[in-house]
Amino acid sequence: MKGPVAFLFLGETLLIPHLYPIVEALAADGDVAIDLWVATSVHEELLTRWSARLTGVRVRRAPGFRRLASGADGRNPPLPPKIPTLIRLLPYLLRARAVVCAEQTSLWLPRALPFLPPFVKTSHGVGSMSARDDPRRRAARVMLVPSERERGTYLARGFAPGRVIATGYVKAAFRQRSMATLPFATPKPVVLYAPHWQRHRSSWWHWGAETVRRIADDGRWNLIFAPHQRLVEGAPAVRQVMADLAGRPNVHTDIDGFAMVDGSYTAAADLYLGDTSSQVIEFLSRPRPCVFLNAGGVDWRTDPSYAQWSCGEVVDDPADLLAALARAPAIHPGFAAEQARFAADSLGDTTGAAPARAARVIRDLLDNPARSGNAAA
């Protein structure tokens, strides 16, 4: 068999849907040995269950592996420290023919030690605020991005064309969604509120608690309040807000469940409410009404980082929130074409073919390890 190819499942569960479809595609022919390195028993239980029938795939515990009481439901676990884990994993990675990751932290290894096997970095988010200038990205032998537009942003930064490859949106092929139906007592239009976790990009610190309470009290909508998993790191009070809303028949809250990262909520919602999270682009793979919260008072029309705000009404005053939600379906036709264009430009192919393209890139590295050049741009 060829390989082994090491896939790093060392971070939050939100990374899993961006990596696992590539594992399935690479394992399809049964001639590549694949090691799935996991940081916790949550990752281990999910990946072991899904990969049981895949040929050549084994789930391996990374140094510092954490065993937790339960993991079958995919709830986001506390992680062991990433850098010590990576350092202790080095002897195993040296035996690999290629390493695949979906986050920047793992790229410290090839940045510091360029003699390591080639690293393949796949995207775990899209949108105009992606940290494309992070120097760690230049340590990847190959960057897999969803679209030609995204690829162009790296070429403009001096990346060699052969090192940045547009595959389409890998997560579109993720099949292991955890929630088929939503737990609401009465059918109503469903609003998904998904604030970003970084303070300078988020509506949470200014308007978040008020936003969820206004919608819950109004009663015209069922609300999914599912912020980025990492919001609680900087805003621990979010758990108290969720506790205060517990038991409301028109509110479903989630901060660490697998449904918030596997595409369940973006598929089920009728209306997206947010700020700068890239989840909106996933939502717009099927155009629907959107409302954006300008809690920071930014001059977004002149800032390309806020390009996604052209896909819906932008609210500058929290007093206007409910009215904006109410009129969003009626004014949606005026945004639908822009939404479709923006989603296609950002996500590329969403037919499910992206993992097979990514697998071909990895196979090419195995067969021709020098073809994609070295870590230099």
Image: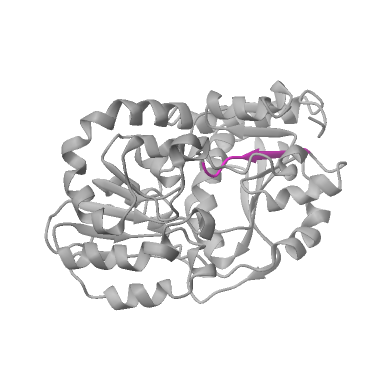
Above-or-below relation of 372 to 57? above
Q: Residue 37 versus residue 1: which sits nearer the camera?
A: 37
Q: Quadrant of the C terminus?
A: top right
Q: Quadrant of the N terminus?
A: top right
In the image, taking residue 327 as reference, residue 280 lies left or right, namely right
Q: Is residue 340 visible?
A: yes
Locate residue 151, reporting x and y percent: 60, 27
- Drawn side of residue 182 relative to residue 54, left or right: left
Residue at left 30%, top 78%?
Answer: 244
| Colour option used | one colour
Indicate the quadrant where residue 255 lies. bottom left
How far from the left and from the top, in percent, is residue 212?
29, 64
Quarter of the image for residue 376 reads: top right
Question: 300 or 34, which is in the foreground?
Answer: 300
- For the residue pair 175 and 237, the one nearer the viewer reads as 237
Does the magenta-highlighted stretch encompass residue 120? yes
Q: Position of residue 210 (x, y in %)?
A: 31, 67
For the residue pair 115 and 203, the one nearer the viewer reads as 203
Q: Position of residue 303 (x, y in %)?
A: 51, 37
Classify 236 as above or below 42: below
Q: Quadrant of residue 205?
A: bottom left
- Residue at the image point whose x is 58% and y is 38% from the top: 27
Q: What number of labels is visible?
A: 0
Q: Tell me: residue 171, above or below residue 241.
A: above
Residue at the spot x=54%, y=42% of the render?
129
Residue 95 appears in view: no
**In this rendering, would 3 be left or right of 56?**
right
Residue 8 is inside the magenta segment: no
Magenta region, residue range: 118-125
